[in-house]
Image (cartoon, rainbow, N blue to C red):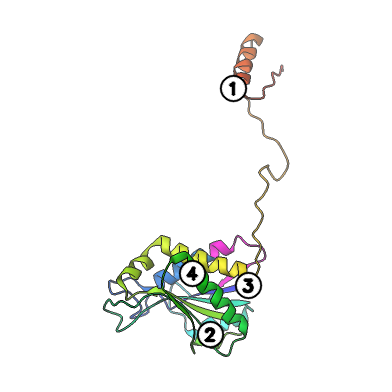
Amino acid sequence: MKIAVDAGHGYTTSGKRTADGMREYEFNRAVANEMQQLLGGYENVSVVFTHSDTRDVPLNERTNKANAGKADVFISIHANAFGNGSTWNSTKGIETYVHDSKPQESFALAEAVQKELIEKTKRADRGVKLANFHVLRETKMPAILIECGFMTNQEEAQALKSASYRKTCAEAITEALATFYKLKKKQAPPPNSPSGKMYKVQVGAFTEKQNATALANELKNKGYSVNVLYE
């Protein structure tokens, strides 16, 4: 399964920041990176990023990349704002968007992601909504856009800045995807070496047998398996 993960906007996008200066892209990118790491733990899953750390990728480039890459689902990560964007206010919570032209799968996925985010973050639930956003309209696969909190709410802005909240959001979205698409976790490799070879440790070498025997007995008393070899 190929998952397109889109960190909204760019580092230099004007206006997209908290009242005290955190850029929205800082949050979006951190969640996207964490999702990539988490999704790497599932079988037959690959992640394609549609954003860039060096520029604000135009919306048509983002959707073209997802479409050309034949992504199976498109996830756009954002942080919200209310009012003029430069002053604090009380509007808060998480909401997830879909386009009304998309099949039922998009709406069902949005509901699953929204539910998991609310359960894990304990934020206000603003629900699943319809919007005519380009990345939802022009993608050829199920697509959702998630607003993970308000940059214009002082308390939520502090959360958006924190590594723990970013990780929590990434975990919630990833777990919802895994459950919705029935993704399977990769199995941990066996603890022994891949070649099946054994590694041995030599503790000491002595010219007198009694010294070797004394050390062997000491190690046995400590619970080690010991062999005394004569060469």
Instruction: Give the answer, above or below, for where 136 lies relative to 11.
Output: below
Indicate the quadrant where residue 63 lies. Answer: bottom right
For label 4, the SS is: helix
Tell me the distance, in whole angstroms, between the alpha carbons under discs 1 and 4. 51 Å
Can you see residue 52? Answer: yes
Image quarter hosting the C terminus: top right
Indicate the quadrant where residue 174 lies. Answer: bottom right
Which comes before the other along the chain, label 4 or label 2? 4
- Residue placed under numbered mark 2 in the picture: 136
Counting the numbered discs, the total is 4
Depth check: 40 or 195 in front? 40
Residue 69: % across, % down: 62, 78
Task: Please give the range of residues in magenta.
Answer: 36-48
Which comes before the other along the chain, label 3 or label 2? 3
Residue depth check, mark 1 versus mark 4: number of the one nearer the observer: 4
Graded by Cα atoms within 10 Å as few (under 14), some (14 to 19) or many (20 or more), the crowding at tag 1 reads few
Q: Amino acid at mark 3?
A: Lys
Q: Amino acid at mark 2?
A: Leu
- Residue placed under numbered mark 3 in the picture: 2
Residue depth check, mark 3 versus mark 2: number of the one nearer the observer: 2
Tell me the distance, in whole angstroms, between the alpha carbons under discs 1 and 3. 52 Å
- Residue placed under numbered mark 4 in the picture: 117
Mark 1 and mark 2 in contact? Answer it, CB < 8 Å. Answer: no
Mark 4 and mark 2 in contact? Answer it, CB < 8 Å. Answer: no
Tell me the distance, in whole angstroms, between the alpha carbons under discs 3 and 4. 22 Å
Q: Amino acid at mark 1?
A: Lys
